[in-house]
Amino acid sequence: MARPIDAYVLNNDLVSWYNDTEDEKEKSILRRVMQRVVQAPTITPPNEPLTCEGCYYIKNNDYSPCAWCIRSKENEDYYRRPPEEDA
């Protein structure tokens, strides 16, 4: 995966460059680039379930989750990551 960028820092650098230039064509290009940075979608990591090592290595579905696993019925609501829109 490509490394994420800090859009605010990049845009501040572009604004500084924009203010330093005199060429109108260059300013026009920089305005478009700054607009694309602001409108770029945010990439978030997938919301994968957390598992304990014991359950992670069990490949056979006949085994039930271990007693400490968050997927066990006793600990069903013990820990859950909040939905993305609530975070």
Image: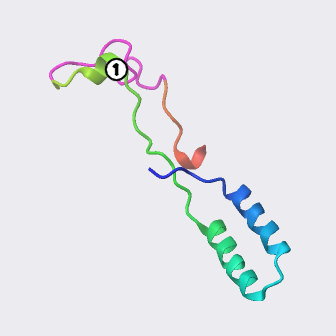
For residue 80, above or below residue 87: above
Q: Position of residue 19 (x, y in %)?
A: 84, 73
Q: Position of residue 10 (x, y in %)?
A: 70, 60
| 20 or 81: nearer the viewer | 20
Q: Is residue 10 inside the magenta stretch?
A: no
Which residue is disc 1 drawn over? Answer: 72
Q: Is residue 77 inside the magenta stretch?
A: yes
Magenta segment range? 62-78
| 18 or 87: nearer the viewer | 18
For residue 4, above or below residue 19: above
For residue 35, above or below residue 13: below
Say what amino acid the circle numbered 1 marks.
Ser
Query: What main secondary structure does the magenta stretch of the protein show?
Result: loop
Residue at image x 34%, y 12%?
Answer: 67
Query: Residue lying farthest bottom?
Result: 24
Residue at image x 34%, y 20%?
Answer: 72
Q: Position of residue 21 (x, y in %)?
A: 81, 77
